[in-house]
Amino acid sequence: MLPNNEVRVPPPRAAAQSAVPRDITADFTEASSKLRTGQLVKDETFTLFEAVGALEIMDSKMDSGYIAPGENQAQALEDNYDVRRDLTPKQVVGLMDQLLCHEMAWHMGHPLSQTLFTSIYIDKLLWPVPRTMEDARFDRVPSESPLVSHVLRAYCLALIKSCDFVHARVASEYFYEEEDFVTQLYNRSLLSAFDSSHFYRLLDQAVDWVEVEEGIDQKVRDAIRSRLLLRRDFLASVDQDLEILDTRSTDSFMSCLSHLKALAETVSLGTTVPEAFSLKLQRKLASTVPPRPIVHIKHEDAFAHMKRLCQDAIDLQQILDYRGPSNFKTAVWTLLSRKPQPSVYIRSLLQALIVSDLTILGAVSVKQFLYDDLAELVLPSSILLRANTDEVEVPSDPRFQIAQQMEGFVKRFAQPFVDTVRCACLNRCRIRRTICHTVIDWDNLQMEAEELDLQLQNLSAEPALQFPGGEATFSYPLSSWAYHQKLIQLRLILQMGFELSIYAPEELPGVYWYLSHICSTHLAHLDRIRTFIVAARKRDLVSSSSRAENPAQTSPAFHKSFLYLERLTTHIIAIDAFAIALHALYVLLARHNVLPSASSPEAYSSDRLRYELRMKPFMPISLPELVPYEEYQREATLDGDADTTILDRASKAITEARKAWEATLANGAFSEDVSSPTREPSIAIEEDWRRDIKDTMRACIGASIAIETVKKALLGDSPPSEKKPVNLQVVIPEIGSKTQWHDWWIVPQISENKTANPPTS
Amino acid sequence: MDNEKAIEYLNGLLGRTLRIHATDGRMFVGLFKCTDAERNIILANSFEYRLPTTSAIQEAAAKETESWDKTSETKSATVKVNMTSRLIGLIVIPGHHITKIELE
């Protein structure tokens, strides 16, 4: 992931600065007329592909500076709109609300040229570039109406300044230009040079003026006042957005919410002033794109967007208390999986909070974060993690050497590990895409970790463990941990594929099979880890009793690991069982030709080609190996199993899944650390997490009903035969539809086909 | 000038900065990238220049007057106003819209 910088705009050149230009019209015209039709003279590096992207001058669709014949030059370039004109208080309300709509449209990903920069008021404040705050006014001679020169001006200035903060926040983090957000400023500055104190002062003055102004209707006056206050609080919110780490205060976002409520109630008081916005302003912007229409979004949508933004920002405060890596990861992932996904500003802010200056949440070093995760999963109370705190400086001491090796490990692994958390801040499509890339890195990281494990097991004199009937083997903690990370990512690739509607219906049996395959691999891996921790625990008890130490010192660490492994296991069993059930169900539907198919029978695509395509992210991975197509084909179609066997498998699996999901829900979102003092619980995020699990359980129930329906059709009074196909209608619900309980669990809607089976009289 | 000479001449201009005046009074300044028999011209990194509007001239004049007021001097009134310019990037100017080509 690389930071996205703003499109670089070369400095404008003064036209008359260089030597006197030479008129070459005649020579040029003569030379070009000698060219043959179709013959080009072009720069070697310049391709026709690039040429296609050139804007055609004098073409009204392409050339934003084009003025149609007959259009008055002055009028076309400068709107006749008089920014000094008197406005009624209701018009001011209307203008403020329209500007907020444009601001939110920009937040949603539309360019400024189609939103805020279509406002003539905003344009006048930003161009010509103001040198002082005084300069930033609508006109050289201020309007005589204080409502315009005080109130509206303060509102507009504060709005621009908050855009400046939002722009800076987003542009400094990972985001996708034009996909998430458009940072292009068209060679304008969003008043970055001015300190925010000026803006607060102007807003306060405006509020003071409005409060005592007798000539305005009370209701309208309150409406204007609450809009000014919203601007003030929103500016304060985005101005000090990182300070939440120190203050833990969400007050300004909270008051934004209450003002927003007032806004929504008074929006009808406003009178629109459509002539204060003009597409013509695009003619003045430095822009390499054709002219584009003004974006209009509804007031409700704008308010809803801002409300969500504020609410997400408030709830974000709940992740700030560090309570161990697994809780932290759960909280971040849950918050960012909200629907609709938190806005790009929130996602950028979260990135900045998650890690800056090698510190997590401004409190924990990335090294500590990595160590905590290792301790939780594979190395409770281990010499490997303690070695560097012993401050041994004798190079021959194994502890010194262990500390050195671990230092190298941290250098190599801390960043990729933090990125696995931060990755959730990207948009949903990009999360999956990024994981497809990083999983390959993790494959290599696992191999490097294995090298380190070999050296460390010598240094720490780890005793081998004898498996019954097997060879002696070692724990390989670091590579085990890396493998665990990789398995999570492989699973996410599949699950996010469901969420992003990547798979065709005919692929569902296979993908759910693969999901259960990854889960069972993961479960076996967790078992292996557990075995070694049990052995370490036994050793620890023996050695501490021989040293007459109190084993209570180390036991919480072990206890924590066992608890964590238990939670992980329960969760993965739940996923595994549900995947097995859906796999079995889809196999039956496919077998009886009632599963809808996206590709036509004559299509070039085949199961094998589709498998190759889908498994592309898995192909370069050395462990777990990609299942060869033949084996996959056999397993995924349950080749050789009778319908009854498969039905039985589906029923059993779905029952197990329901139990396991209930257990997962009972375990809760976060593992409670008994040793740490009780902190404020993450109520809203925990609620989101519970809703997610409950939705999964609803999908489970839906699946068991579907399985029953199929069972009835297959084993009922009139079992299908060669002549009579199975009498079922199958609909695969779309992602986001009401019948789709959970994005990751596509449960088919199965009903008896009434029309195909006329009742026999 | 035969075809070969013409190509040689035009090749020599590639990468140089051209000023192209269009029928609507605008001027485009950018790096010469490509041309053809129709005299269509592609410029890269180009800027659009437009003569200032009457109101901009009036504004500048007013400012000038203000500064005179302060210094209480009177000067003959020639107001200097820069052409307004903006970056528009890669453009193609159709040959029939070109009124004048200058080489910087």
Image (cartoon, coloured by chain):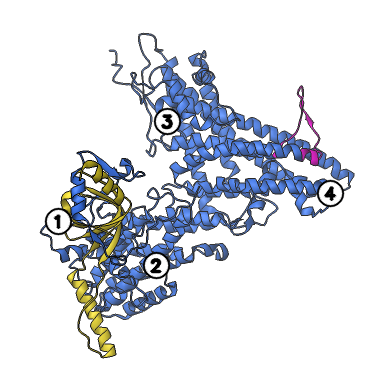
Residue A184 image-quadrant placement: bottom left
Residue A310: % across, % down:
43, 59
Residue for point 37% across, 59% down? A10
Amino acid type for the residue under numbered disc 1: Ala
User: What is the spatial separation of the Cα atoms under label 2 and label 3, in whole angstroms?
Assistant: 44 Å
Position above or below: A547 against A298:
above
Residue A243: % across, % down:
53, 65
Q: Nearer the viewer, mark 4 or mark 3?
A: 3
Same chain? Circles 2 and 4: yes
User: What is the spatial separation of the Cα atoms under label 4 and label 3, in whole angstroms?
Assistant: 56 Å
Q: Do the residues bearing badges 1 and 4 touch, measured as CB atoms within 8 Å?
A: no
Where does label 4 land, which residue?
A550
**Residue farthest to the left, as pictured:** A70
Magenta highlight range: A456-477
Residue situated in front as seen by the camera: A21 or A139: A21
Residue A655 in view of the camera: no
Q: Chain of mark 2?
A: A
Mark 2 packing: few (<14 Cα in 10 Å), some, or many (20+)?
many
Is A557 inside the magenta-drawn segment? no
Q: Chain of mark 4?
A: A
Where does label 2 land, which residue?
A161
Q: Do the residues bearing badges 4 and 3 touch, measured as CB atoms within 8 Å?
A: no
Residue for point 20% across, 64% down? A77
For numbered disc 3, what is the local secondary structure?
A: loop
Where does label 3 land, which residue?
A503
Q: Earlier in the sequence, mark 1 or mark 2?
A: 1
Amino acid type for the residue under numbered disc 3: Tyr
Mark 3 packing: few (<14 Cα in 10 Å), some, or many (20+)?
some
Q: Earlier in the sequence, mark 3 or mark 1?
A: 1
Q: Chain of mark 1?
A: A
Q: Which mark is residue A68?
A: 1
Q: Earlier in the sequence, mark 1 or mark 4?
A: 1
